[in-house]
């Protein structure tokens, strides 16, 4: 069974959350403003390359539907799910937030899967993501949502980094990931690993194992796969910072949209994640049908490769919802006109969830 977080840890986490809330209240979200840096606009050759890659990926999607063999389609779906696990279970929950610990065989697997997602090395990814949480939706956030939907989705990869990001990222502590030999190996040989894992193997396997055409092998499991994997993760930075509910903290831009459950493979509980970034589940739910990453981690916890899984107690969650939520929580919300926030609070105290 997966180990549970301790109540003492939950109390400490709640105290940290209250401190962060106070700091957030005193510091308004910085909006992007016109400046000499902003007037430089997009780096046009990178913008062109990105649009070309996206177009090639769309063509790969067309071939996925009308031309590729069913084995190639299944292979592409498997690659998509595996690469997403490399990001969510590896770069995100394990290395960025240290929400659990993993033995070296699991770390090696996650490093390979993350490389297959083609989203830079883990160390680079961790730096950007920790900056995103520490300076969320400000100029120091690499994909600052206040600069627009396109920018937070993919435009941030097509511009020079904001000076605030460059300045503050120098103080970001990455000593834990930089000391990891597996991650150092990946960063050192990243170009070689990407060429093998992202291009050569996905192309050669379909051609030689089930006689797929070279065109389908290149456009479907390589280009179409990477466009899908990128956009699935990018929606968390863009759509989930613009539309949706904020049941845990209405002061954050991070939201939750049920419709994105399948697309993001269960990573759509973003308001919860920003409220409790140390929870290995990134939601209140367990490893259900679409909570694939949580189920993935739970499996490795059962065989002993994942351990020290951090979770949040119901009492800590309830207090945060009642203090800062927007009223949309499925249990402790107060959207019902016939029941006030105070009445719900009293009812929860009298009839705890565990009863």
Image: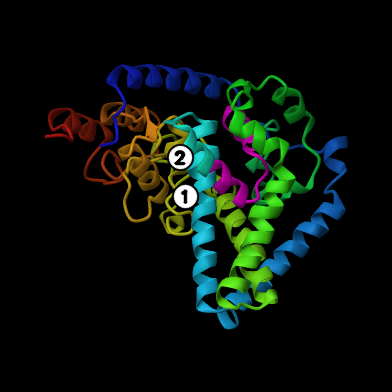
User: Could you tell me which secondary element the residue under label 2 belongs to?
Assistant: helix
Is residue 157 rendered magenta in the image? no
Question: What is the magenta range?
Answer: 110-137
Decide if residue 104 is in sight here.
yes
Residue at (65, 47) in percent of width and height: 119
Q: Is residue 250 visible?
A: no
Mark 1, residues whose alpha carbon is within 10 Å: few (<14), some, or many (≥20)? some
Separation of residues labelled 2 and 1 (CA atoms) = 9 Å
Residue 113 colored in magenta in the image: yes
Image coords of residue 332 (percent x, y) = 27, 38
- Residue topped by disc 1: 244
Q: Are there few (<14), some (14-19), or many (20+) residues within 10 Å of tag 2? A: many
Q: Tell me, for residue 234, which label it has, or none.
A: none
Q: Main secondary structure of the magenta part?
A: helix
In this figure, which residue is indicated by the disc labeled 2? 271
Name the residue located 82 percent from the left edge and 52 percent from the top edge.
46
- The answer to whether residue 297 is above or below residue 315 is below
Q: Earlier in the sequence, mark 2 or mark 1?
A: 1
Contact, mark 2 vs mark 1 (Cβ under 8 Å): yes
State whether residue 196 is above or below residue 321: below
Which one is nearer the viewer's eye here, 261 or 183? Answer: 183
Quadrant in which residue 286 is drawn: top left
In x, y percent, where is residue 178? 64, 25
């Amino acid at each position: 069974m997966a180990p549970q977080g301790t109540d003492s840890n939950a109390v400490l986490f709640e105290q940290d959350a209250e401190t962060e809330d106070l700091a957030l209240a005193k510091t308004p979200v910085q909006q992007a403003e016109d400046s000499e840096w902003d007037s430089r606009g997009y780096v046009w050759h990178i913008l062109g390359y990105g649009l070309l890659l996206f177009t090639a990926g769309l063509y790969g999607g067309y071939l996925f539907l009308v031309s590729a063999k069913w084995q190639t389609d299944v292979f592409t779906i498997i690659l998509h799910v595996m690469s997403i696990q490399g990001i969510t279970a590896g770069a995100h929950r394990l290395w960025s937030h240290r929400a659990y610990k993993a033995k070296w065989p699991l770390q090696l697997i996650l490093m390979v899967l993350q490389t297959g997602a083609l989203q830079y090395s883990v160390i680079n990814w961790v730096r950007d993501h920790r900056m995103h949480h520490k300076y969320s939706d400000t100029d120091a956030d690499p994909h600052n949502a206040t600069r627009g939907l396109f920018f937070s989705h993919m435009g941030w990869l097509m511009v020079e980094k904001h000076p605030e990001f460059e300045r503050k990222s120098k103080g970001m502590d990455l000593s834990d990931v930089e000391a990891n030999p597996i991650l150092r190996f990946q960063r050192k040989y990243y170009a070689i690993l990407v060429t093998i894992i992202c291009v050569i193997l996905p192309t050669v396997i379909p051609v030689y194992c089930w006689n797929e055409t070279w065109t389908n092998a290149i456009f479907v499991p390589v280009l179409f796969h990477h466009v899908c994997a990128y956009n699935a993760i990018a929606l968390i930075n863009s759509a989930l910072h613009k539309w949706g509910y904020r049941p845990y903290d209405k002061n954050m831009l991070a939201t939750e949209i049920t419709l994105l459950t399948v697309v993001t493979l269960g990573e759509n509980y973003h308001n919860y994640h920003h409220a409790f970034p140390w929870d290995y589940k990134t939601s209140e739910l367990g490893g259900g049908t679409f909570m694939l990453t949580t189920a993935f981690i739970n499996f490795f916890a059962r065989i002993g490769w994942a351990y020290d899984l951090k979770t949040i107690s119901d009492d800590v969650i309830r207090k945060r919802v009642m203090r800062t939520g927007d009223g949309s929580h499925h249990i402790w919300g107060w959207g019902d006109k016939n029941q006030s926030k105070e009445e719900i609070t009293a009812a929860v105290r009298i009839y705890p969830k565990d009863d």
